[in-house]
């Protein structure tokens, strides 16, 4: 019952709290403060922000941390049962966007290295980025689509493993040069599926290192180009920017300070 109510609360928050960055630059800053009034007016009960967060947190009974390379701190990845997460808190995407499609490629051998890179098959992002992504999902669902997530937060430890497995700077960011965008918790590799989970035609497969993977689109089908432009339009609307060389790669225009384990 709590899981059903959780999904309802999230959907309600998304449908009324999603405003493009150009329309209201403070929409995401005010997200939590508006949530309590919104929920109270939508269901026949009085629900405080703390109570709402407790429902959101009900499915995880203990705090968990992501292990990282020894040169870096470990970061919190679970929400508190008493407070709404801070924007820099790493959270599990499915806890807030339960109908997102997750296919975390680096948690399997189905990636360009042929090697399992991640120990965890869950997808995480900063809470601030997840709020924006929830708005993207909401708008796409009205058109008959859902988001498909191939990669999200990548711990520095995983970035080192990826580099050691495939040390080619043309395809993998060298962690010796600093924290990569995926390790900042605000970058995502994303595509589209239909409501039934079937794939939407896009310019290329994930991690296709050819010209068809860029945002030129002159060398792909018109259908693939239109679908990619649709995703790009909505991602940009809610505060993301895309990497030109990879149509699937988007970063939050805000960078959040990740919260380490004390």
Image (spheres, rainbow, N blue to C red):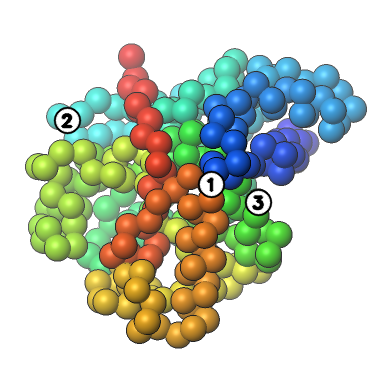
Within 10 Å of the Cα at label 3, are there few (<14), some (14-19), or many (20+) other Cα atoms? some
The label on residue 238 is 1
Residue 195 place in picture, x, y as percent: 66, 66
Of residues 62 and 234, the one drawn nearer to the viewer in this rendering: 234
State the SS at label 3: helix
Residue denoted by label 3:
138
In this orientation, does residue 94 appear? Answer: no
Q: Name the residue: 40% across, 51% down.
A: 241
State the SS at label 2: loop
In this orientation, does residue 156 appear? Answer: yes
Within 10 Å of the Cα at label 1, are there few (<14), some (14-19), or many (20+) other Cα atoms? many
Marks 1 and 2: which is nearer the front? Answer: 1
Residue 95 position by quadrant:
top right
Position of 234 relative to 255 (above/below): below
Marks 2 and 3: which is nearer the front? Answer: 3
Instruction: Give the quadrant of the N terminus.
Output: top right
Separation (CA) of disc 1 from disc 3: 11 Å
Residue denoted by label 2:
70
Instruction: Give the quadrant of the C terminus.
Output: top left
The label on residue 170 is none
Residue 5 position by quadrant:
top right
Of residues 42 and 19, the one drawn nearer to the viewer in this rendering: 19
């Amino acid at each position: 019952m709590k899981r059903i109510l959780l999904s309802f609360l999230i959907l309600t928050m998304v449908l009324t709290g999603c405003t493009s960055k150009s329309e209201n630059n403070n929409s995401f800053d005010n997200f939590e403060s508006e949530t309590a009034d919104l929920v109270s007016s939508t269901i026949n009960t009085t629900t405080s922000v703390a109570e709402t967060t407790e429902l959101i947190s009900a499915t995880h009974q203990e705090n968990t941390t992501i292990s990282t390379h020894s040169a870096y701190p470990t970061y919190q990845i679970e929400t508190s049962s008493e407070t709404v997460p801070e924007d820099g808190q790493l959270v599990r995407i499915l806890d807030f966007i339960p109908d997102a499609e997750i296919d975390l490629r680096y948690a399997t051998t189905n990636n360009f290295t042929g090697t399992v890179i991640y120990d965890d098959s869950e997808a995480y992002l900063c809470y601030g980025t997840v709020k924006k992504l929830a708005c993207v999902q909401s708008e796409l669902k009205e058109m008959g689509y859902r988001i498909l997530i191939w990669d999200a937060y990548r711990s520095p430890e995983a970035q080192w493993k990826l580099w050691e497995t495939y040390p080619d700077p043309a395809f993998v960011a060298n962690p010796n040069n600093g924290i990569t965008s995926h390790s900042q918790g605000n970058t995502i590799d994303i595509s589209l599926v239909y409501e039934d989970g079937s794939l939407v035609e896009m310019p290329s497969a994930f991690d296709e290192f050819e010209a068809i993977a860029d945002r030129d689109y002159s060398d792909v089908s018109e259908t693939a180009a239109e679908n990619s432009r649709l995703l790009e339009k909505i991602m940009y609307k809610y505060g993301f920017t895309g990497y030109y060389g990879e149509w699937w790669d988007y970063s939050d225009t805000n960078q959040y300070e990740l919260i380490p384990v004390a």
